[in-house]
Amino acid sequence: MLLLTRSPTAWHRLSHLKPPVLPGTVGGQALQLRSWFLSRQGPAETGRQGQPQGPGLRTRLLITALFGAGLGGAWLALRAEKERLQQQKRIEALRQAAVGQGDFHLLDHKGQARRKADFRGQWVLMYFGFTHCPDICPDELEKLVQVVRKLEAEPGLPPVQPVFITVDPERDDVEAMARYVQDFHPRLLGLTGSTEQIAQATHSYRVYYSAGPKDEDQDYIVDHSITIYLLNPDGLFTDYYGRSRSAEQISDSVRRHMATFRSVLS
Protein backbone atom coordinates (compact mmCIF):
# COMPACT_ATOMS: atom_id res chain seq x y z
CA MET A 1 0.00 0.00 0.00
CA LEU A 2 2.85 2.36 0.68
CA LEU A 3 4.15 1.79 -2.89
CA LEU A 4 0.81 2.76 -4.36
CA THR A 5 0.75 6.00 -2.41
CA ARG A 6 4.03 7.24 -3.88
CA SER A 7 3.97 10.16 -6.28
CA PRO A 8 3.66 9.58 -10.09
CA THR A 9 7.28 10.60 -10.55
CA ALA A 10 8.50 7.96 -8.17
CA TRP A 11 6.28 5.32 -9.78
CA HIS A 12 7.69 6.21 -13.24
CA ARG A 13 11.28 5.77 -12.00
CA LEU A 14 10.49 2.42 -10.44
CA SER A 15 8.82 1.17 -13.60
CA HIS A 16 12.10 1.57 -15.53
CA LEU A 17 14.17 -0.45 -13.09
CA LYS A 18 15.26 -3.87 -14.48
CA PRO A 19 15.29 -6.95 -12.28
CA PRO A 20 18.81 -7.82 -11.23
CA VAL A 21 20.46 -10.78 -12.88
CA LEU A 22 22.90 -12.68 -10.75
CA PRO A 23 26.30 -13.09 -12.43
CA GLY A 24 26.42 -16.73 -11.43
CA THR A 25 23.13 -17.66 -13.13
CA VAL A 26 22.59 -18.86 -16.69
CA GLY A 27 20.78 -15.66 -17.57
CA GLY A 28 23.73 -13.63 -16.34
CA GLN A 29 26.20 -15.55 -18.45
CA ALA A 30 24.03 -15.19 -21.58
CA LEU A 31 23.70 -11.46 -21.09
CA GLN A 32 27.46 -11.06 -20.66
CA LEU A 33 28.19 -13.14 -23.80
CA ARG A 34 25.66 -11.19 -25.87
CA SER A 35 27.12 -7.88 -24.71
CA TRP A 36 30.66 -9.07 -25.53
CA PHE A 37 29.64 -10.31 -29.00
CA LEU A 38 27.92 -7.08 -29.93
CA SER A 39 30.88 -5.07 -28.66
CA ARG A 40 33.17 -6.97 -31.09
CA GLN A 41 31.07 -6.08 -34.19
CA GLY A 42 31.39 -2.87 -36.14
CA PRO A 43 28.39 -0.76 -37.01
CA ALA A 44 28.22 -2.15 -40.59
CA GLU A 45 27.89 -5.72 -39.26
CA THR A 46 24.83 -5.20 -37.08
CA GLY A 47 21.30 -4.36 -38.12
CA ARG A 48 18.63 -2.40 -36.38
CA GLN A 49 18.09 -5.11 -33.82
CA GLY A 50 21.75 -6.05 -33.48
CA GLN A 51 21.50 -8.96 -35.91
CA PRO A 52 24.70 -9.86 -37.87
CA GLN A 53 24.65 -8.63 -41.51
CA GLY A 54 26.66 -9.68 -44.61
CA PRO A 55 28.11 -7.28 -47.22
CA GLY A 56 25.91 -4.30 -47.97
CA LEU A 57 23.52 -4.24 -50.92
CA ARG A 58 25.69 -1.77 -52.80
CA THR A 59 28.73 -4.02 -52.41
CA ARG A 60 26.83 -7.08 -53.63
CA LEU A 61 25.52 -5.19 -56.66
CA LEU A 62 29.02 -3.97 -57.49
CA ILE A 63 30.47 -7.48 -57.29
CA THR A 64 27.66 -8.84 -59.46
CA ALA A 65 28.18 -6.08 -62.05
CA LEU A 66 31.94 -6.66 -62.20
CA PHE A 67 31.45 -10.41 -62.56
CA GLY A 68 28.91 -9.91 -65.35
CA ALA A 69 31.17 -7.44 -67.15
CA GLY A 70 34.03 -9.92 -66.99
CA LEU A 71 31.91 -12.69 -68.47
CA GLY A 72 30.61 -10.36 -71.19
CA GLY A 73 34.11 -9.23 -72.13
CA ALA A 74 35.35 -12.80 -72.33
CA TRP A 75 32.40 -13.80 -74.53
CA LEU A 76 32.99 -10.89 -76.90
CA ALA A 77 36.68 -11.72 -77.15
CA LEU A 78 35.94 -15.37 -77.96
CA ARG A 79 33.36 -14.34 -80.54
CA ALA A 80 35.77 -11.92 -82.23
CA GLU A 81 38.48 -14.59 -82.35
CA LYS A 82 36.04 -17.11 -83.82
CA GLU A 83 34.99 -14.63 -86.54
CA ARG A 84 38.62 -13.84 -87.30
CA LEU A 85 39.47 -17.53 -87.74
CA GLN A 86 36.41 -18.11 -89.92
CA GLN A 87 37.32 -15.14 -92.07
CA GLN A 88 40.91 -16.37 -92.42
CA LYS A 89 39.73 -19.83 -93.46
CA ARG A 90 37.40 -18.26 -96.02
CA ILE A 91 40.22 -16.16 -97.49
CA GLU A 92 42.52 -19.17 -97.73
CA ALA A 93 39.81 -21.23 -99.43
CA LEU A 94 39.17 -18.47 -101.96
CA ARG A 95 42.86 -18.12 -102.72
CA GLN A 96 43.21 -21.85 -103.27
CA ALA A 97 40.43 -21.53 -105.83
CA ALA A 98 42.79 -19.22 -107.77
CA VAL A 99 40.08 -16.60 -108.32
CA GLY A 100 41.26 -13.26 -109.64
CA GLN A 101 44.93 -14.16 -109.68
CA GLY A 102 45.37 -13.38 -113.36
CA ASP A 103 45.88 -9.93 -114.84
CA PHE A 104 43.64 -8.05 -117.26
CA HIS A 105 44.25 -5.40 -119.93
CA LEU A 106 41.22 -3.19 -120.59
CA LEU A 107 40.22 0.40 -121.39
CA ASP A 108 38.45 2.65 -118.92
CA HIS A 109 35.52 4.91 -119.84
CA LYS A 110 37.98 7.70 -120.66
CA GLY A 111 39.92 5.55 -123.13
CA GLN A 112 42.92 5.00 -120.84
CA ALA A 113 44.55 1.57 -120.74
CA ARG A 114 44.09 -0.20 -117.40
CA ARG A 115 45.63 -3.26 -115.77
CA LYS A 116 44.87 -4.91 -112.47
CA ALA A 117 48.27 -3.76 -111.24
CA ASP A 118 47.06 -0.15 -111.56
CA PHE A 119 44.86 -0.71 -108.52
CA ARG A 120 47.66 -1.96 -106.29
CA GLY A 121 47.47 -0.21 -102.93
CA GLN A 122 43.70 0.28 -103.13
CA TRP A 123 40.67 -1.60 -101.91
CA VAL A 124 38.48 -2.42 -104.92
CA LEU A 125 34.83 -3.44 -105.23
CA MET A 126 34.28 -4.89 -108.71
CA TYR A 127 31.12 -5.89 -110.56
CA PHE A 128 30.63 -7.54 -113.97
CA GLY A 129 27.53 -6.61 -115.99
CA PHE A 130 26.35 -4.70 -119.06
CA THR A 131 24.80 -1.31 -119.74
CA HIS A 132 21.64 -2.65 -121.41
CA CYS A 133 20.73 -4.69 -118.34
CA PRO A 134 17.14 -3.75 -117.44
CA ASP A 135 17.17 -4.07 -113.66
CA ILE A 136 19.67 -6.38 -111.94
CA CYS A 137 22.85 -4.55 -112.95
CA PRO A 138 21.53 -1.09 -111.98
CA ASP A 139 20.38 -2.49 -108.62
CA GLU A 140 23.69 -4.19 -107.91
CA LEU A 141 25.72 -1.14 -108.95
CA GLU A 142 23.56 1.07 -106.78
CA LYS A 143 24.20 -1.29 -103.86
CA LEU A 144 27.92 -1.23 -104.60
CA VAL A 145 28.10 2.57 -104.56
CA GLN A 146 26.04 2.64 -101.35
CA VAL A 147 28.79 0.59 -99.74
CA VAL A 148 31.42 2.99 -101.11
CA ARG A 149 29.52 6.00 -99.74
CA LYS A 150 29.07 4.38 -96.33
CA LEU A 151 32.79 3.70 -96.05
CA GLU A 152 33.70 7.15 -97.41
CA ALA A 153 31.70 8.73 -94.60
CA GLU A 154 33.76 7.01 -91.91
CA PRO A 155 36.96 8.88 -91.06
CA GLY A 156 40.10 6.80 -90.84
CA LEU A 157 39.06 4.19 -93.40
CA PRO A 158 40.96 3.96 -96.70
CA PRO A 159 38.99 4.78 -99.88
CA VAL A 160 37.39 2.01 -101.91
CA GLN A 161 37.59 2.11 -105.70
CA PRO A 162 34.37 0.99 -107.43
CA VAL A 163 34.87 -0.78 -110.78
CA PHE A 164 32.35 -1.94 -113.38
CA ILE A 165 33.53 -4.36 -116.09
CA THR A 166 31.25 -5.09 -119.02
CA VAL A 167 30.41 -8.59 -120.27
CA ASP A 168 28.93 -7.13 -123.47
CA PRO A 169 31.89 -5.70 -125.40
CA GLU A 170 29.90 -5.66 -128.65
CA ARG A 171 27.70 -2.79 -127.45
CA ASP A 172 29.57 -1.40 -124.43
CA ASP A 173 32.35 0.62 -125.99
CA VAL A 174 34.20 3.47 -124.24
CA GLU A 175 31.48 6.04 -125.01
CA ALA A 176 28.66 3.79 -123.83
CA MET A 177 30.49 3.04 -120.57
CA ALA A 178 31.14 6.75 -119.98
CA ARG A 179 27.43 7.58 -120.33
CA TYR A 180 26.44 4.73 -118.05
CA VAL A 181 28.80 5.09 -115.08
CA GLN A 182 28.12 8.82 -114.60
CA ASP A 183 24.66 7.98 -113.22
CA PHE A 184 26.04 6.11 -110.20
CA HIS A 185 29.16 7.54 -108.59
CA PRO A 186 31.78 10.09 -109.69
CA ARG A 187 34.58 7.60 -108.98
CA LEU A 188 32.94 4.56 -110.57
CA LEU A 189 35.34 3.31 -113.22
CA GLY A 190 33.91 1.57 -116.27
CA LEU A 191 36.15 -0.95 -118.08
CA THR A 192 35.67 -2.45 -121.52
CA GLY A 193 37.78 -4.07 -124.21
CA SER A 194 37.79 -6.52 -127.06
CA THR A 195 35.92 -9.80 -126.95
CA GLU A 196 39.15 -11.63 -126.16
CA GLN A 197 40.16 -9.18 -123.41
CA ILE A 198 36.76 -9.43 -121.72
CA ALA A 199 36.93 -13.22 -121.97
CA GLN A 200 40.31 -13.20 -120.24
CA ALA A 201 39.12 -10.94 -117.40
CA THR A 202 35.90 -12.89 -116.81
CA HIS A 203 37.75 -16.21 -116.87
CA SER A 204 40.16 -14.94 -114.22
CA TYR A 205 37.25 -14.18 -111.85
CA ARG A 206 35.18 -17.24 -112.78
CA VAL A 207 32.40 -15.05 -114.20
CA TYR A 208 29.78 -16.81 -116.26
CA TYR A 209 28.12 -14.87 -119.11
CA SER A 210 26.25 -15.76 -122.26
CA ALA A 211 24.48 -13.53 -124.77
CA GLY A 212 20.91 -14.52 -125.56
CA PRO A 213 19.22 -14.54 -128.96
CA LYS A 214 18.62 -11.21 -130.70
CA ASP A 215 15.10 -9.95 -131.24
CA GLU A 216 13.79 -8.12 -134.32
CA ASP A 217 15.43 -4.91 -133.11
CA GLN A 218 18.77 -6.71 -132.74
CA ASP A 219 18.47 -6.28 -128.97
CA TYR A 220 19.44 -9.06 -126.60
CA ILE A 221 20.00 -9.85 -122.94
CA VAL A 222 23.26 -11.18 -121.54
CA ASP A 223 22.86 -13.82 -118.87
CA HIS A 224 25.68 -13.57 -116.33
CA SER A 225 26.68 -14.34 -112.76
CA ILE A 226 25.71 -11.71 -110.19
CA THR A 227 28.61 -11.14 -107.84
CA ILE A 228 30.46 -8.21 -106.29
CA TYR A 229 34.18 -8.93 -105.76
CA LEU A 230 36.45 -7.43 -103.12
CA LEU A 231 40.17 -7.00 -103.87
CA ASN A 232 42.63 -6.00 -101.16
CA PRO A 233 45.52 -3.52 -101.62
CA ASP A 234 47.80 -6.38 -102.72
CA GLY A 235 45.48 -6.89 -105.68
CA LEU A 236 44.35 -10.26 -104.32
CA PHE A 237 40.77 -11.48 -104.42
CA THR A 238 39.60 -11.38 -100.81
CA ASP A 239 35.83 -11.90 -100.71
CA TYR A 240 32.66 -11.91 -102.80
CA TYR A 241 29.03 -10.92 -102.20
CA GLY A 242 25.97 -12.36 -103.91
CA ARG A 243 22.71 -10.66 -104.69
CA SER A 244 21.20 -11.55 -101.30
CA ARG A 245 23.79 -9.53 -99.37
CA SER A 246 22.70 -6.04 -98.36
CA ALA A 247 24.80 -2.88 -98.55
CA GLU A 248 25.07 -2.88 -94.76
CA GLN A 249 26.29 -6.49 -94.67
CA ILE A 250 28.87 -5.83 -97.36
CA SER A 251 30.06 -2.68 -95.57
CA ASP A 252 30.53 -4.63 -92.33
CA SER A 253 32.48 -7.32 -94.17
CA VAL A 254 34.77 -4.80 -95.88
CA ARG A 255 35.46 -3.09 -92.54
CA ARG A 256 36.49 -6.41 -91.00
CA HIS A 257 38.81 -7.17 -93.91
CA MET A 258 40.36 -3.73 -93.60
CA ALA A 259 40.91 -4.20 -89.88
CA THR A 260 42.69 -7.55 -90.30
CA PHE A 261 44.58 -6.84 -93.53
CA ARG A 262 48.32 -7.49 -93.52
CA SER A 263 50.15 -7.09 -96.80
CA VAL A 264 51.98 -10.15 -98.07
CA LEU A 265 53.96 -8.11 -100.61
CA SER A 266 55.74 -5.67 -98.30
Image: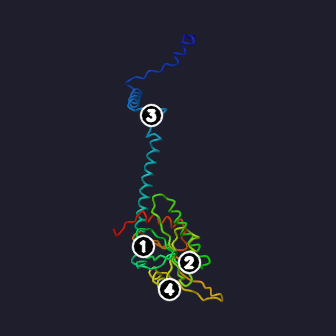
Labelled pair 1, 3 in contact (Cβ < 8 Å): no
Q: Which mark is residue 118?
A: 1
Secondary structure category for the residue under label 4: helix
Query: Where on the picture, by quarter, is residue 176?
Result: bottom right
Q: Earlier in the sequence, mark 1 or mark 2?
A: 1
- Of tags 4 and 3, which is closer to the observer? 4
Residue 95, horizontal then vertical, whole percent: 40, 76
Per the image, the residue denoted by label 4 is 195
Q: CA distance from mark 4 to mark 2?
A: 17 Å
Which amino acid type is marked by label 3? Answer: Thr
Residue 170, horizontal then vertical, whole percent: 55, 85
Query: Where on the picture, by quarter, is residue 181?
Result: bottom right
Residue occupying the far right of the picture: 216
Which amino acid type is marked by label 1? Answer: Asp
In the drawing, does residue 144 fall left or right of residue 260? right
Q: Earlier in the sequence, mark 4 or mark 3?
A: 3
Per the image, the residue denoted by label 2 is 175
Labelled pair 4, 1 in contact (Cβ < 8 Å): no
- Of tags 1 and 2, which is closer to the observer? 2
Q: Residues within 10 Å of mark 1 (few under 14, many from 20)?
A: few
What residue is drawn where x is 49% and y is 71%? 125
Q: CA distance from mark 1 to mark 3?
A: 78 Å
Residue 195, horizontal then vertical, whole percent: 50, 85
Q: CA distance from mark 4 to mark 1?
A: 21 Å
Which amino acid type is marked by label 4? Answer: Thr
- Indicate whether 47 appears above or below 213: above
Secondary structure category for the residue under label 1: helix
Query: Where on the picture, by quarter, is residue 99?
Result: bottom left
Q: CA distance from mark 2 to mark 3?
A: 89 Å
Q: Earlier in the sequence, mark 2 or mark 3?
A: 3
Per the image, the residue denoted by label 3 is 46
Q: Earlier in the sequence, mark 4 or mark 1?
A: 1
